[in-house]
Image (cartoon, grey):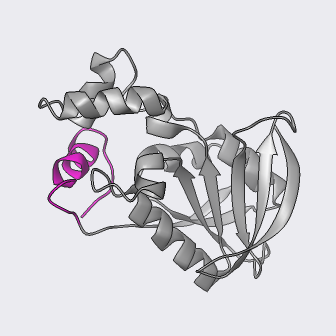
Amino acid sequence: MQRQVQAFLPTDWGNFNIIAYATSPDDLTPHVALVHENLDVTQPVLVRIHSECMTGDLFHSHRCDCGEQLDRALELAAEQGGVVIYLRQEGRGIGLINKLKAYNLQDKGFDTASANTHLGFEVDARQYDLAVEILHDLGIHKIRLLTNNPLKIEAIEHSGIEIISREPLIIEPKKENAAYLRTKQELMGHLLK
């Protein structure tokens, strides 16, 4: 994977540079880093590693808290000169079509973890080594990791990048996503209040 292109991206939260990473310039779904214009790599950088969630990020689904987490992460990155890494691994790595099939199973009583395994997938098939590559490319060596996910912490701990602190990203539950958040906490070990 290589840095393919960088462009200036003014947003509702502030000014970022968006950098696309892919193995080929023809890749239609590159991973991206949104790097705030005030990034200072000599200080510990606030970093959010966010996996794509079309239903939450784009359509503001209430089935999850992903879109709200992304919005909050961009707000904090703008305030603190941070970075949001957006990994294209939809549906915990199973893709949009299978994620929608998992939604149908959830509507029949499955939790998010058992829906994935019922479809023949891991509970969470995401990988974070690409985020580590992006951090190295950006010259970031010390971070304040904005996450509730212990798998992200573990991936960074074995990367040569120092985690100065883990900062929680807690979104107020809605009735539609309370069970989803409970599954993340109880079965997947997410660090939620």
- In the shown orientation, is residue 26 left or right of residue 66? right
Instruction: Give the percent coordinates (x, y) of residue 80.
Output: 62, 82
Instruction: Give the percent coordinates (x, y) of residue 97.
Output: 44, 28
Instruction: Give the percent coordinates (x, y) of residue 105.
Output: 22, 27
| Residue 125 visible in the shown view | no
Instruction: Give whichever of 134, 17 is nearer the camera.
Output: 17
Q: How many marks?
A: 0
**Residue positioned 53% across, 47% down in the render:** 52
**Residue positioned 78% across, 51% down in the render:** 20
Instruction: Give whichever of 142, 100 is nearer the camera.
Output: 100
Q: Is residue 125 above or below residue 32?
A: above
**Which quadrant of the figure contains the C terminus?**
bottom left
* Residue located farthest toward the top when viewing the structure as drawn: 120
**Residue positioned 65% across, 76% down in the render:** 11
* Residue located farthest toward the front when viewing the structure as drawn: 59
- In the shown orientation, is residue 160 left or right of residue 24? left
**Which quadrant of the figure contains the N terminus?**
top right
- In the shown orientation, is residue 79 left or right of residue 35? left
**Residue positioned 57% across, 55% down in the render:** 49
Q: Magenta stretch?
A: 173-193
Q: Is residue 150 magenta?
A: no
Q: Is residue 33 above or below residue 23?
A: below
Q: Is residue 65 above or below residue 83?
A: above
Please identify the quarter of the rendering in which residue 43 is found. bottom right
